[in-house]
Image (cartoon, rainbow, N blue to C red):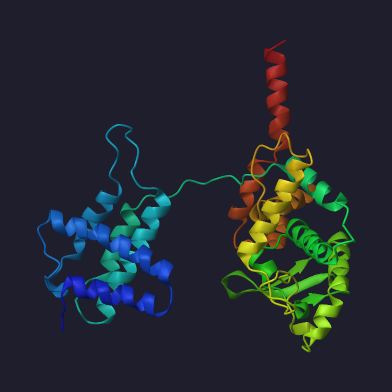
Amino acid sequence: MSISIEAAMDEFVAIYEDKDAHKTARSYRAALAKFCQVLELNHIPLSSPIGELNFDLVEDFIALLHERDETTDESKMTVATEKAYLTAFRRFVAFVSAKDYSNVNVVRVQENIRLLQRSEGRRLPDVDIDGVKEFLGYVENHVIDLEDPDKAMRDRRDRALIFFLAHGGFRIEEACGLTRKNLNMVAKQARFIGKKDKEAIVRITEKAFVYLKEYLASRQKLDRATGRELKHLPLFARHDRAVGKRIEPISTVTGWKIVEDWLGRAKKAGYLKNLYSPITPHTLRHYFVTMVYLATGDLKIAQELARHDSTATTERYTHLIAPHLDRAHKLTFQELEG
C-alpha cells in the first residue's frame, strides 16, 4: 500500500497533534517543509507516491541545512536546529517503513545522517561563582515581612527552593515535582525518579532544610485544610489567587520566575553590580557542581552528586576550575613581564 508524499507527511505529524504534543508537531512540520524544498528542487510533486520516493535525497536535505549566508559565510541554521530537523526526518522515515508505505532502507538513511550531520561544539558552563554567592547571601539575609503572612509564606518558599537548587543540585523540574513523601527529614535526603526515569537520591544541606522547615511550618494551616495526607502534598506549592486555599505544585515556569524575581530584587537593593553572567535555576545547578569539585578535587564524586551519566559532562567544569593552569599562566607572564 502506498499513499502520496503529502498524505504521509500529514499522517505523521497528526500522530503528535493527537497526543497534544503541539510543539513537537510544529517542529516536525517545519522540518518536513524544509525537506519539501529538496523535492521541489528535484521536480518531485508532493502528490507522488511515497513508495516511489528515493530517500537518498537525505543527502541533498542535509546539504540544504548546511547552506551558508553569502555575505557572512556563516551557516544559516544552528547546529541545534539542524539536529532537531534530522531527528524529525529520521522518525518520518521510520514511520513510513513501519506503515509499509515504502521499502525504504531505514538503516542506510540513518547512517547517511550520522556521517553527514554537523556536531555541536562543546560549551563550558556559564557560571559566575562569586555572583551566585552574592545572590545567595542576599536571599539568605533578606528580612521576611511578618506583617504580611501571605507574602512571608511565598518568600520562605522561594528561599527554600533557591537553596535546594544551589545546595542540592536539583534540576528545576525535579525540585518542582517533589512531594513531601520524597523527603527523608532525618537523613536530609530526597529520593525521587529523575531524568531518564532513574531513581535518584539527593543530599541536602542543613541550611536548605532549615529554610524548608520554616516554609512548611508557615503552611501548616493550609495543608491541614486540604484534608489530604501530608505525604501527598507538593513540597513547593503555589500561593496565588488562582488556586485560593488549594495546595498545588509550582510549575517549572514559576520556578524560573522565582529566581528571576529574586535576582531583580537583589539588583534593586544594590547587589550584583559586577555580575558577568545570568543567574537562572540551571546556573544554580552549575554552581553546585562547581563547588563540589572545588571542595573535593574529585571528578567522580562531582559526577555522582550531580547525577551526570558520564564524567565527560562533569569534566567541563574542570576547564573553569584549574588552579594549576592559573598558577602556570601567572608564573609564565610574571617572568616575561619582568
Where's residue 205, x and y in %? 84, 61
Q: Residue furthest top?
A: 338
Question: In the rendered image, which quarter contains the C terminus?
Answer: top right
Placement of 74 over or under 33, stated as above or below: above
Residue 330's quadrant in the figure?
Answer: top right
**Number of numbered markers:** 0
Residue plotted at (77% across, 85% down): 226
Question: In the rendered image, which quarter contains the N terminus?
Answer: bottom left
Placement of 317 over or under 150, stated as above or below: above
Residue 9's quadrant in the figure?
Answer: bottom left
Residue 162's quadrant in the figure?
Answer: bottom right
Where's residue 160, x and y in %? 80, 62
Where's residue 141, x and y in %? 87, 50
Residue plotted at (73% across, 54% down): 288
Where's residue 99, x and y in %? 26, 82
Placement of 155 over or under 222, stated as above or below: above
Residue plotted at (33% across, 44% down): 76
Viewer-closest of 308 and 63:
63
Q: Residue furthest left?
A: 43
In this rendering, position of residue 136 left or right of residue 255: right
Residue 140 visible in the shown view: yes
Residue 299 visible in the shown view: no
Residue plotted at (27% across, 34% down): 70
In this rendering, position of residue 137 left or right of residue 325: right
Viewer-closest of 254 and 84:
254
